[in-house]
Structures are given as C-alpha cells and as structure tokens.
Amino acid sequence: MTYDPTGHLLLTPVDREAPLRVRRLRQLGLGDRPDPALDAFAHKLADVTRAPYSMVNFIDENQQFFAGLHTPTGTHAGTGQGAAAPGGVSRFMARDHGYCPHVVVRRKALVLEDVCDYPRFAGNPVVDEIGIRSYLGAPLIDRTGMALGTICVVDTEPRPWGRAGLETIKSLAAELVERIHRREDSGF
C-alpha cells in the first residue's frame, strides 16, 4: 500500500445539510427543473463577469443541477440526465465534479484564478474532462440560514478575478437570494 499525501485534498467535502437542503428546495419549488428566470440570471452573470459559462446551481446528496445555465453557444441539455446535446452542456453534474460543493459546505465564496495553482482543486475531474481553468462562485444562503446552492462562473482560461470579482459574485448571490425570497413571499 502506498501513501498519497495529497489524496485527501481531492475529496469532495461531506455535506451533512444535503437532506435538509433538498427539503427546503422543494418548499421553494427549485432545484429539479430548468427555470427560465434562473437561465436569465445566469446570462446576467456571464454578461457582468464576461465569463463564457455561468450557472445557478442546486446540490443534493448525489448531484448538482444547473437550474440556471448560460453557455457561449446557448446550447445545453434539457431536463434529462446524461450527456449533453451535441455542442451543449448538461444541466447535471456529479457531486464530486467541480467546485460548487466546496462553496456550499464552506458557506463562503471561492475564487480560483487558475485552478492548476491549487493542488486541492487541480485534480478535479472538470479540469481534464471539460477544460475548466478558472472558477468564481458564491453560496446562496437564504433567510433560514440554509445554503441552497451557488452561483458561479467558469472559464477555460485563467482569469484574474481579484477582489472586484469576489465582491461582484457575492453581490450577485445576495441579489438572487432576494429574488428567491420575493418569489417565496408572493406564493410563487
């Protein structure tokens, strides 16, 4: 048996809140189907950050679901699981892929200007399988204190997001949470 000192760094964090999150998302009517308003919000994220890909992501015990999704081509798979349409991006991703599960568990924004600079994140499957090189994401923490999911933007090139990027993604996350609260208060 060999010892791999970095092996523990690549694991997706344990998410003990996932069952409660799923229940809260169901109360809100979110997280199980694409939402045109969230697609529009993802488009806004892409415009503001000038990122080619952006998502409004809800996470359960097993997978991530992009209820809001923007891609450079505007093409992505619908509600079905599995591979994306040709030239598109699927709305589903395994829970151990990407960086949003880390943001949800940490409950803090995450800035990775070049994921390859961080051994903990460089080995994530999205680097080799999709070509992700930079990530900027923030949690969506609602009035109950639950981290519902994230908003994020990614690029296939390193990006100097800096403090301005961090403040922008946090502000946009707060804006979306307010929209979710207004939607809940109006009875959907």
Image (spheres, helix red, strand yellow):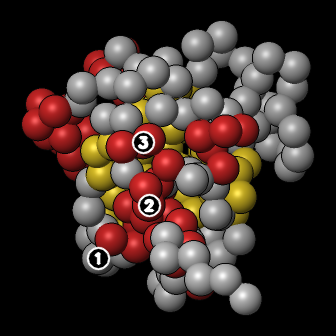
Left or right, 38 with reference to 78: left
Q: Which residue is mark 1?
A: 145
| Mark closest to the chain's N terminus, 3 or 2 | 3
Residue mark closest to the camera, 1 vs 3: 3
Q: CA distance from mark 1 to mark 2?
A: 27 Å
Q: Which mark is residue 36?
A: none
Q: Which residue is mark 3?
A: 115
For residue 157, above or below residue 109: above
Amino acid type, mark 3: Val
For residue 28, above or below residue 51: below
Percent position (x, y) of residue 172?
26, 38
Q: Which mark is residue 120?
A: 2
Circle 1: element type: loop
| Mark closest to the chain's N terminus, 1 or 3 | 3
For residue 127, above or below residue 53: below
Q: CA distance from mark 1 to mark 3?
A: 29 Å
Residue mark closest to the camera, 1 vs 2: 2
